[in-house]
Image: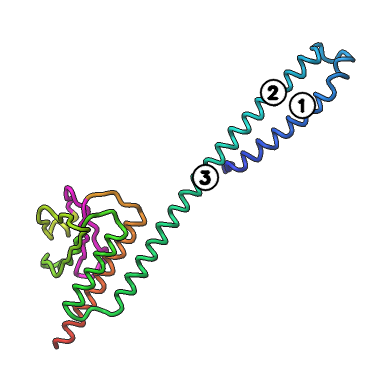
Amino acid sequence: MQKNSPLRDLDALILFYLFVLFVLFALLVETPYLITHGIFIFSEESLELTILTVLSLLGATMYRVYRREIDRKTKDYNEIAQHVGVVNRQIESMRSMAQKIQKLPQTKGDLKQLLTTMCERALEITPYDWVLIRIIDEKTTHTLSEHAESRGRALLMQYEIGNKDLLDHVPLEGYTVLASNHLNALVRTCAIMPTEALSDEQQTMLQAIVNEVTLLYLVYTSRHYKGSD
């Protein structure tokens, strides 16, 4: 069974209030006639006071319901505005990243610049003080390349993290690890960061970054070996 929406409930309550208001108003107008003909045994003053009391209670109830609905809508609008702001910042970050990566990496210098750019983008979209991106050979577990960036003089990792632990998704105390999720890339890119909560949007952006690093690294290696033939 489909539930009524809050707005539909509010409309129904308003209609009920108007109906009761009409009935009580009509009753108030006819009070002298009803009392004169003995239909009501109460005095005119008592009946009018009762009707006014009911109207006041109904008015107060309607006001509370209306304020509650307005507060709920205001909260929804604020959440939407906040979400739109986050999305706009992410789009701007992706646009900036696309402008900086205008060519595929061909040299070690290009690869280093790529990793620098990706680390900078990761810091822009997260609250982290530092981030390290490491590319690992899944077969040998050797580090193929890595780069770290930090805000100001923020300290990086306090101890070395083994590549096997990264590949095996071993939980690491004090760190957050987000890895690329390609099934047949033969290399895996891991972003290593401090442990802090991330929104779904931030996690999605980080996942896109590590996945793109993996793909661009594969392009780099294919061009590198092709050029050395």
Q: Amino acid at mark 2?
A: Val
Three-letter amino acid code at disc 1? Answer: Leu
Which residue appears at 43% of the width and 52% of the height? 82
Task: Work out whether 118 lies above or below 107.
Answer: above
Colour scheme of the rendered structure: rainbow
**Residue displayed at 43% across by 57% down:** 85
Res 1 seen here = no
Q: Residue at x 27, y 61 (%)?
A: 122
Q: Which mark is residue 74?
A: 3
Residue at image mark 1: 24
Q: Extreme bottom residue here?
A: 229
What segment is highlighted magenta in the picture?
A: 170-194
State the residue position of label 2: 54
What whole-number distance in Å separates the C-alpha atoms at marks 2 and 3?
30 Å
Rendering coords of residue 187 (x, y %): 19, 68
Secondary structure type for disc 1: helix
Which sits earlier in the primary sequence, circle 2 or circle 3? 2
Q: Name the element at disc 2.
A: helix
Sooner in the amino-acid sequence: mark 3 or mark 1: 1
Describe residue 67's horizontal placement relative to residue 83 as left or right. Answer: right
Of 157 and 223, nearer the camera is 157
Mark 3 → mark 1, Cα distance in angstroms: 34 Å
Front tag of 3 and 1:
3
